[in-house]
Amino acid sequence: MEKASLSYDEIFEIYFACRATKRRAAGALAFEIDYERNLLELCDELNQRRWKPGSCNCFIVEKPVKREIFAAPFKDRIVHHILIDKLNPCFERFFIKDSFACRTGKGTLAAIKRLSHFVNSATRNCKKESYILKLDIKGYFMSINRTLLYKKLERFIQTDYRAYLCKKSQEKGQGKIQKGGWIFDLAEIEEKISFVTYLAKEIVFNDPTKQVSLKSPKSAWKGLPRDKSLFTAKQGCGLPIGNLTSQVFANFFLTEFDHYIKHTLGIKRYVRYVDDFVIVHESKSYLKYLIPKIRTFLKDELGLTLHPRKIYLQEAKKGVPFLGAFIKPNLILAGKRIQKNFAQKSEQFERLAHDHKPSRNEKIAVLASINSYLGILRQYKSWKLRVTVLKKHFAEHLSKHFGLKKNALKLEKKKWK
């Protein structure tokens, strides 16, 4: 192979970016002990097409909802970042403006604000009657057909990614103008396409259930629906929750559906965050008409099933729960789950301070946790909630250690020894 698909400079840069959010993880620490040698070996493995996904850790988390998580080894996480780093510029051109998740500047808060804008626009700030249709895909991650996903990715790489590489070559002055258009170094472009295709294929068709270490007792899976576990997914279906590639590929897989909604059906007020999507429209009958069309498209084109028990159709003035918030015309409220968790966490810390004098580390944990909740809640209309909860639980014991900033926006530490 004359030209390497991946340079040492590239893999070191991606490693440091990947490490930034996982530095305290055991796998990241073990890799870091001799990271230079490990990275050089990994780079050679990738360039020689010898890399294969390793064994995952699998465990159950209970909050915010019960989920099965597959944690890939740190070495594989670097590879995931390499692939997404190469494809992301093309994905961004392919994704519609109103799809959110795993995109820069397009997290949950951005999705909530976008939907709020659509609700306000449709109702003309409460002056006009409008309706909200919220839908959900049943067992989305476990229902994604890996063969279909790979075919879509392969086609995307051969067309969009190829066009992107040619354009980058042109911008760098690496192509030549001849009669009939630009001429590029096709060998180099084909090598890059081959490399990205290789990574995509290895990752998409990897079945982590075949080499896995369970970090939760088997009893922890009790109560988890079968369509939420990779162990009980249909043959050839399912992406592991916990991998960067799974999150991005899940977004990519539904982009064809996004274009159907926006361009074929011509719907303007549409927001999607992973598999939760909402449409706002002035006509209730039109939204009812859309449901079977959406169900048919998802089934026929993507092999997905609309969740029969998660069809929400209401007047906009009644509001809609979305990504932990509750959205009404000209109003965004904190959802019931975050309200409950905030109150429970505050009560838990109050009991801690009542039982004994908190250590410095315990106080740091309180400060970080409560301020995290306050940072989220301040994005919504929640002043009364913040004041009520904090005055109730911080009035006596915790007030010895913390001060409360005006308007209940932030806890501040008092002088600690």
Image (cartoon, rainbow, N blue to C red):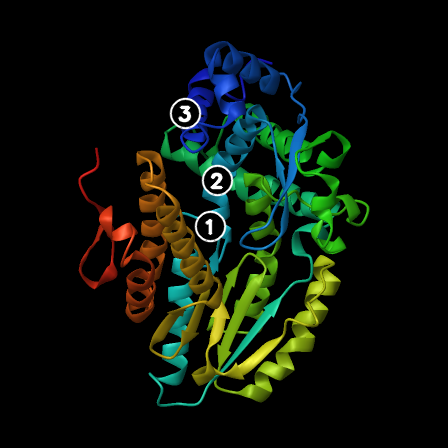
Q: Is residue 223 left or right of residue 174?
A: right
- Which dot marks residue 125? none
Of labels 3 and 1, earlier in sequence is 3
Q: Is residue 111 left or right of residue 257?
A: left
Of labels 3 and 2, earlier in sequence is 3
Residue at 43% across / 20% down in the picture? 12
Q: In front: 359, or 129?
A: 359
Callout 1 touching callout 2 (CB < 8 Å): yes
Amino acid carrying label 2: it is: Tyr
Give the Cα distance between marks 3 and 2: 25 Å
Q: Give the residue at mark 2.
A: 164
Assign a secondary structure to mark 1: helix
Q: Residue lying furthest right in this view?
A: 235
Amino acid carrying label 1: it is: Arg
Q: Residue 14 occupies which quadrant of the picture?
A: top left
Q: Give the residue at mark 3.
A: 16
Q: Quadrant of the C terminus?
A: top left
